[in-house]
Image (cartoon, rainbow, N blue to C red):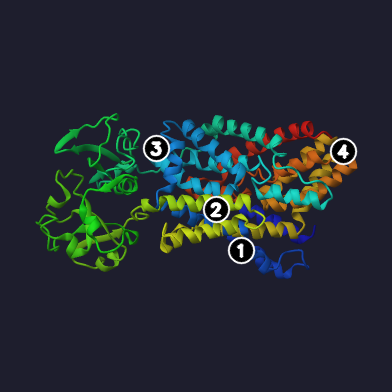
Amino acid sequence: MGWEGWFTLSVVAVMVYGLARNLAADMVVMGCLVLIMAVSPFAEAKKLPTVNQLVEGFGNNAMLTVAVLFVVVAGLVQTGAMAMITKPIIGQPKTVAAAQARLLFPVMALSTFMNNTPCVAMFMPVVDDICKKYKISPSKLFLPLSYASTFGGCCSQIGTSTNIVVAGLMVKAGMPAPGMFDITWVGLPTALIGMFFLMATSKWLLPDRKPAISLSDDPRQYTVEMIVQAGGPLVGQTIELAGLRHLPGLFLAEIERNGGILPAVGPTERLQANDRVIFVGIVESVVDLQKVRGLLPATDQVFKLNDPRTQRCLIEAVVSDRCPIVGKSIRDGQFRRRYDAAVLAVARSGQRINAKIGDIVLQSGDTLLLEAHQSFEDRNRNSSDFFLVSSVHNSAPPRHDKAWMALLILLTMIVVNLAWSQYFDILTAATLAAGLMIVTKCCTAQEARESLDTEVLVSIGASFGIGKALESSGAAQWLAANLIDAAQSVGGGPWAVLAAVYFATMILTELITNNAAAVLVFPIALAAAKNLDVSSMPFIMSIMVGSSAGYATPTGYQCNLMVMGPGGYRFSDYLRIGIPLDLLYMIVTVALAPLIWPF
């Protein structure tokens, strides 16, 4: 290994240090890639990738797949389809352990037959909702979500692309290709043990990070009226089952039914058609309330606006003392006609306003929650009628009528990828699905753009370039060969060499891409098995598991990077729970593989 390899290893050490200091992941990884790009022209031929090769990661299938899956998920979220799928599965977990059990086992089962990246992308908004609704720290669920998808990926031949790559290497070496569930003999026991380890130790090994400011600390308390849609899914359900109890930052004040008032509504009270349900809470929770299937805004002004609901959002506007309708009711001041916006709720110094929306007499300083066209903010930003105008993030009214269309697109994507994988890989299937989400208006083009998480995408793209440098410089092969040679040189038998093969694969998976790790270690493992005059199958199956099971670093697998921001994780969090999990997987795999495929 020349100076290029040592330089690349030094850059990786800098990257690890930067991540350990909790610096921005995208800036750290991209900065390290730039260092290699600056040195690349001075390296010997092919000892470092060219600049063009280093940036190929930004066009890598895995990174592009993650990008288009964000759009697919946006369509599922904006139509409420994701809630339709997951609500019966997730239920109403009361504890972290219950939430993990209800979430992780379905994810693991799904990722057995589906690439784990879309599994994580699909369930990320679900985890976010669970955390907000049941006041669970996001750091207790997001990383287990990523790990559970990896557990499932190791349980079948199509669960992860690495298994397919290794199968291709076996055929190329003149060996028969493994069957669909050959890897399951090792993958399933390790997955179950890994799941038990996660649920048993996450209480201590995962951080419990929560926002410094509670949702209930927001002084803007809106009184919101919603109508239970006749013939909708909430009719006949209890308050508890409908999910309208214990909402974060929001409480159910009363129900108006047939001219009467039901105060202090109990959890067993059943909803009836056209019930007027009155909530008091903060704007973030009002946004969530607007997206509940079967609830409609009580004011009919929403349905009289000129613009289609797909082009609207929620906007907060503070009424100034120069507003012409101060001192008038919202109805008498003809607010909708004057501003082309419908008032959904009014916040007034934390007071509850006991009046229907149209009867509320506006005062200077009132904060209005409006539904209006997205251009409302630009049109009224400098208006003397309002002190402040600001749109509410991710507040477009849900398109519940498109939910079944979104589900059909998702199902088609999964079936196409599974049944015709030789023609449609996951990138092609996901790209078609993302395009259909936009064409069918399950999400708008603007929502599709906003759904892209640039920090995740930059981190993934740059990490591929660094992995390519480790591979080209010979550093990765040097690490693998020396680890395996050390096991042989001390007189270690097949078990010791097998452990070294797994360990080398695991280390490379944490540093470079999982597929590259498998490709690098595969010929070294075959040579080691030949020298020992033993079967190569235990080594090959260990490579399959080890090259997918990267748990100790955020760069070990793209799913780990995807959950880093939403979970609020630090680099040390991955080490704390990932290293024991890596070693546990290694022990179980090395112990089982020779028993199933004897030396």
Provide the residue designation for mark 2.
413
Which image quadrant: the N terminus?
bottom right
Mark 4 → mark 1, Cα distance in angstroms: 41 Å
Label 3 CA crowd tier, 10 Å (few <14, some 14–19, many 20+)? some
Residue 48 vs 66, above or below: the answer is below
Q: Secondary structure at mark 3?
A: loop
Residue 335 vs 284, above or below: the answer is below
Q: Secondary structure at mark 4?
A: loop
Numbered label attached to residue 59 = 1
Q: What amino acid type is highlighted by mark number 2?
A: Met
Mark 3 → mark 1, Cα distance in angstroms: 38 Å
Front position among marks 4 and 2 = 2
Query: On the picture, is 447 further left or further right than 154?
Result: left
- Residue 475, given in percent of the width and then of the height, sits at 75, 55
Q: Secondary structure at mark 1?
A: helix
Provide the residue designation for mark 3.
135
Instruction: Please give the name of the residue rendered at 27% of the width and 64% of the height, measured from the top-left corner.
Output: 376
Choose between 268 and 497: the one closer to the eye: 268
* Residue 391 placement: quadrant: bottom left
Q: Earlier in the sequence, mark 3 or mark 4?
A: 3
Choose between 395 and 365: the one closer to the eye: 395
Front position among marks 1 and 2 = 2
Q: What amino acid type is highlighted by mark number 3?
A: Lys
Front position among marks 3 and 4 = 4
Mark 3 → mark 4, Cα distance in angstroms: 54 Å
Numbered label attached to residue 534 = 4
Instruction: Please give the name of the residue rendered at 41% of the width and 34% of the height, measured from the top-left corner.
Output: 92
